[in-house]
Structure formats: structure tokens, C-alpha cells
Image (spheres, grey):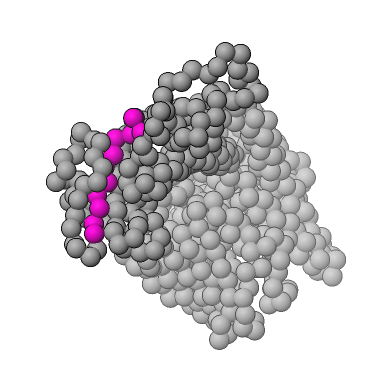
């Protein structure tokens, strides 16, 4: 349940992160796009006049006050001036103030004569020679104007008018400062937001999951107690059945009792397995060679009784961080499967491929070729299991336990061999 | 041979009290700690007891039986119990539930053989 809670916090944090990132991207993306658009409007205005601002018409007084009684809401903030394109006053790139506030230069490259000249120069940060070199680097020839950012905060436009190519570069440093501030503030805000979300989620998830953790603990406790309490009655039933057989001889009924008791005993053992793999017991580095060779030794008697030989091939030094008890039970379950269903021989192999540990258990069988991943479903028994003990929970436990330690399992039959692989 | 079978489950006592009587054995039964010690007064070569027998201090019993030279089979319900008594009993002395009469008979033969081997070694 702790893992589930951690996953919940992780996925919730991911959702918050994606949401905040989306909002930040929209805001800052729009902000910078609008800044670029405003800058392009200025360079477009300059391009219309070959890289210079239009001269004010004769008689134009820039600081004309509106006439007395002007209704600002009705007539606009300032009276319409033919010089102002949109009739608005000092707003946006088309403001009459723009010409006085923008720092810029324009370099002209005449195609015919090959001459280069600075046709407009209203900037202190760049010398004229530097401006020419800069424009040379940006110059492109084509029908369409080319715009872009250069040297961080400068916006340029390269355009062809007549036989000349012009490059106009305007300094947008001052205009971009607020945008950068918004970017930095929003990133800080995002980081703070994520931290607060993490703390809040960690706190709330504990309260949220407490009833679930309690229910899970009670369920496991119940399963463990039930498993223990079933065992003595099963022992008594088996003993009583044996006594009946000794006194009256075996019968179909006593054979049936033995069969059902064995089935109950297997179910009880599987119940115990199901309860154990959810426990958060200590995790240590386990050498797979040791785990599986011990299980093979443990199953030696039942394998010998079934006439099955097992060959073992372990790649040296393969170890896995896992609960040793859990790994042992996985190995025991697999060997029990082999002892029940292999015909005469089996092989067990551990290897490391591309950073992944692969445990392969294969044995001869009478099943047709194909994928048998459904063998890991609960209570599923393959056709070759008829007449053998088992409730169909063993491999289901293996799959769940392997998943618990971050791996997966697969099963198939190829050329008369049942091949079970664990990817850990 | 005298054998003592102890369990708090009366049905288990009943059926194994009878089942173990084969081969001329004398089978004594006990359902709790005090009764076990009462039965032990007459001596027993082998004691088969549930690890959770009521009113029994198991470690004390195991030490006593070790001194007396009696063999023990401990019937356990969970693997944890094995860890608790590993230093007092050999690996072969533990028999987990559920078990069949044949498994118990096999265990009895195994533990008595082990006892004889140790006696020969001593």
C-alpha cells in the first residue's frame, strides 16, 4: 500500500507539473510571441521607409493637446492625426513616440554597385562598422522579408526594395525585460507551486490512504490467520480418513476425501503465498544462483520421484535487490510446477541481457505450440494439468510476486517445450 | 516404544492417538502443558507436540527433553516458529501442518534414526 501511495503522489505531482508547465508555456510563449510581433511591426514600419522612420509632416507638432471638451471615450484618447495610422496616441509600436524611443540601425546593400552604406543609425551600443559586419551576417536575398532575433534581444528584418537589400536591426532589450522578468517569476512560482503541491499531497495522501492501508493490513492478517486455522482441520480430516481406510478398507469416498483435502492443502499454501508478497519486508541483494539452486535441491526428492532431471545453468554474479523470502517462494513455486508437469527433463537458466535479468525455466510437455500467458491468471489450469493436484494459483502468485519486484513473466510452448521466462 | 502425542485439538489427539498405535507402540496423549508433564513422568522416547500447546513453556520443555535424551517432533503452523527453536532442535524435528499420517510416520523414522546416530556417535 505504501507503494500505491507513492505512485499516487508521483502521478498527482506529474499532473500538477504538466498543468503548470502548460500554463507557463502559454503565458510566456504568448508574451514572447507578442514581443516579437510588436518588434516586427516596428521593423515593417521602418522597411516601408527604407529602414528609417517617416519624417513628421510639415507643421506637425507632436505634443498637440486635445481640444477642450474632447470626449475621450467617444473620440479616442487623442484627436485623429493623419500621421498616426490607427488614430490612437502613444500606444504600441505605431505610436509617434516609437521613433524617439527605438534604438536601431539600417544597412543598405546595393546589388548593382555593390556598395554598402548605413542609411539609418540611431544606436549607441554598436559602431557603424560593427553594424555593417552584423548586417552582412544577417543578409539574405529573397522575395520575402526575413525576420528573427539576433544576439539575444535584437530583432532584425532583412528585405529587398528595388535593387537594394536592407537589413534593419532594432534593440528590444528594454521591451523584453518585463517578459524575462515574467518568465523568471513564473518559473520560480512553478517551482514553489510544485513544492507546495508535493507537501500537500504527501500530507493528504497519508490521511487518504490510511483507511485503505488498514483494510489491506486486516485483509492480509485475515488471510494469514485463515491459512493457519485451515491447516489443523485438514490434518485431522486426513488422519480420520486414514483411520477409516484402515478399519474398513479404502473406498471411492475415502479416495475422494484425500483428493479434496490435498486440493484444500494446496489452496491454503497458496493463500499464504498471496498474503506474504504484499508485505514490506527487508530487501537485500540476493544471488539468483543461490536462490534457484537451493530450490532445486529442495525439490530433488519430488523431481526424482517424478523421474525428472533438471539441468542448471547460472551466469555468475547475477544478483537482485528483493525480499529473499519472496524470491525463494517464486523459485519453489516454479520448481513445483516443473515437478508436476514436466515429462522427463527440465532446464533452468539465469542470464543478464541488455541490463535485464532473465530467468528461463523450460521443460518438455505435451501442449501444442503457442503463447500461454493466460497460465498466470488465477485458477487457470492448462489441459495437461488434468488429474494433477493444484488450484491454479501457483503461477498467478509467481506473476504477482515478479511484478511486485518490478519484473514481468511470460510463457509459451515451442517445439514441445514449455518455456517460462521471468524478466527481472 | 513409548510415544507422547500432544495437541490442544481433541480430534487430532483422537485420530493420531489411534493411528500411532501401530507396530506395538504405547501412545500417550496430552492436550495441554500440565498434562504433558504428567504423562512425561513415566518417560517417553519420542514426544510429538504442537508448538502452540496451551499452558506450555516450550523452550523449557525442549531443554528438559534434550537433557532426558528424548527425541522431539515439533508440529508447526508457520515458518517463523522454526527460526525461534532452531538452536534447540535439528532441522529434521520440524513438521509443518497440514501433514498426512504417512508424512508423520516418515518423520518419526527419520528422527529416531537421527537420535540413534547421535547416540552411536556419543
Q: Is residue A249 left or right of residue A405?
A: right
Location of residue A169 (image quadrant): top left
User: Is A109 one of the magenta-colored residues?
Assistant: yes
Image coordinates of residue A230 in percent, x first then y, are: 72, 47
Residue farthest toward the bottom in the current orientation of the protein: A415
Image coordinates of residue A242 in percent, x first then y, are: 76, 60
Dominant SS of magenta comes to strand
User: Is B64 one of the magenta-colored residues?
Assistant: no
Residue depicted at x 26% and y 42%: A120
Front in this rendered view, residue B46 or B110:
B110
Residue farthest toward the front in the current orientation of the protein: A59
The stretch in magenta equals: A99-110
Is any atom of residue A52 visible in this view? yes
Residue farthest toward the top in the current orientation of the protein: A68
Front in this rendered view, residue A167 or A161:
A161
Residue depicted at x 36% and y 46%: A49
Residue depicted at x 64% and y 84%: A368
Q: Is residue A312 left or right of residue B16?
A: left
Location of residue A349 (image quadrant): bottom left
Image coordinates of residue A385 in percent, x first then y, are: 69, 73
Q: How many marks?
A: 0
Front in this rendered view, residue A92 or A396:
A92
Front in this rendered view, residue A195 or A341:
A195
Image coordinates of residue A422 in percent, x first then y, are: 50, 64
Residue depicted at x 19% and y 39%: A126
Amino acid at each position: 500500500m505504501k507503494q500505491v501511495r507513492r505512485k499516487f503522489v508521483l502521478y498527482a505531482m506529474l499532473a500538477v507539473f504538466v498543468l503548470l508547465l502548460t500554463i507557463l508555456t502559454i503565458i510566456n510563449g504568448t508574451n514572447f510571441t507578442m514581443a516579437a510581433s510588436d518588434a516586427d511591426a516596428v521593423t515593417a514600419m521602418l522597411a516601408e521607409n527604407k529602414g528609417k522612420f517617416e519624417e513628421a509632416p510639415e507643421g506637425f507638432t507632436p505634443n498637440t493637446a486635445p481640444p477642450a471638451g474632447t470626449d475621450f471615450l467617444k473620440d479616442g484618447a487623442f484627436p485623429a492625426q493623419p500621421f498616426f495610422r490607427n488614430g490612437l496616441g502613444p500606444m504600441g509600436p505605431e505610436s509617434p513616440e516609437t521613433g524617439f524611443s527605438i534604438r536601431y540601425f539600417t544597412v543598405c546593400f546595393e546589388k548593382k554597385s555593390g556598395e554598402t552604406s548605413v542609411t539609418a543609425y540611431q544606436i549607441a551600443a554598436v559602431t557603424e562598422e560593427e553594424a555593417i559586419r552584423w548586417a552582412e551576417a544577417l543578409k539574405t536575398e529573397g522575395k520575402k522579408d526575413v525576420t528573427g532575433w539576433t544576439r539575444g534581444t535584437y530583432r532584425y528584418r532583412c528585405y529587398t526594395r528595388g535593387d537594394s537589400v536592407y537589413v534593419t536591426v532594432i534593440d528590444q532589450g528594454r521591451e523584453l525585460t518585463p517578459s524575462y522578468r515574467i518568465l523568471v517569476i513564473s518559473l520560480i512560482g512553478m517551482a514553489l507551486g510544485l513544492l507546495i503541491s508535493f507537501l500537500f499531497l504527501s500530507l493528504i495522501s497519508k490521511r487518504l490512504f490510511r483507511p485503505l492501508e488498514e483494510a489491506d493490513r486486516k485483509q492480509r492478517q485475515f488471510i494469514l490467520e485463515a491459512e493457519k486455522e485451515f491447516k489443523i482441520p485438514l490434518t485431522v480430516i486426513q488422519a480420520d480418513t486414514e483411520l477409516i481406510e484402515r478399519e474398513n478398507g479404502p473406498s471411492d469416498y475415502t479416495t475422494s476425501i484425500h483428493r479434496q483435502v490435498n486440493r484444500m492443502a494446496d489452496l491454503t499454501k497458496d493463500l499464504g503465498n498471496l498474503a506474504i508478497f504484499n508485505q514490506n519486508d527487508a530487501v537485500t541483494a540476493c544471488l539468483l544462483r543461490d536462490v534457484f539452486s537451493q530450490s532445486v535441491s529442495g525439490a530433488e526428492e519430488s523431481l526424482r520421484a517424478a523421474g525428472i532431471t533438471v539441468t542448471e545453468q547460472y551466469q555468475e554474479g547475477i544478483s537482485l535487490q528483493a525480499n529473499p523470502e519472496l524470491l525463494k517462494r517464486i523459485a519453489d513455486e516454479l520448481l513445483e510446477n516443473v515437478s508436476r508437469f514436466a515429462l522427463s527433463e527440465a532446464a533452468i537458466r539465469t542470464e543478464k541481457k541488455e541490463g535485464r535479468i532473465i530467468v528461463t525455466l523450460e521443460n518438455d510437455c505435451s501442449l501444442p505450440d503457442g503463447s500461454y500467458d493466460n497460465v498466470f491468471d488465477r485458477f487457470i489450469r492448462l489441459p495437461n494439468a488434468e488429474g494433477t493436484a493444484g488450484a491454479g494459483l501457483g503461477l498467478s502468485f509467481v506473476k504477482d510476486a515478479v511484478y511486485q519486484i518490478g519484473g514481468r513473466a511470460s510463457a509459451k510452448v515451442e517445439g514441445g517445450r514449455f518455456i517460462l521466462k521471468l524478466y527481472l | 516404544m513409548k510415544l507422547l502425542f500432544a495437541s490442544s485439538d481433541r480430534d487430532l489427539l483422537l485420530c493420531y492417538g489411534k493411528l500411532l498405535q501401530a507396530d506395538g507402540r504405547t501412545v500417550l496423549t496430552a492436550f495441554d502443558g500440565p498434562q504433558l508433564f504428567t504423562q512425561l513422568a513415566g518417560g517417553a522416547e519420542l514426544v510429538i507436540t504442537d508448538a502452540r500447546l496451551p499452558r506450555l513453556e516450550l523452550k523449557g520443555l525442549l531443554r528438559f527433553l534434550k537433557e532426558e535424551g528424548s527425541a522431539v517432533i515439533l508440529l508447526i503452523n508457520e515458518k517463523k516458529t522454526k527460526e525461534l527453536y532452531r538452536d534447540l532442535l535439528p532441522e529434521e524435528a520440524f513438521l509443518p501442518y497440514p501433514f498426512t499420517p504417512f508424512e508423520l510416520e516418515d518423520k518419526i523414522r527419520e528422527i529416531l534414526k537421527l537420535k540413534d546416530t547421535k547416540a552411536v556417535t556419543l
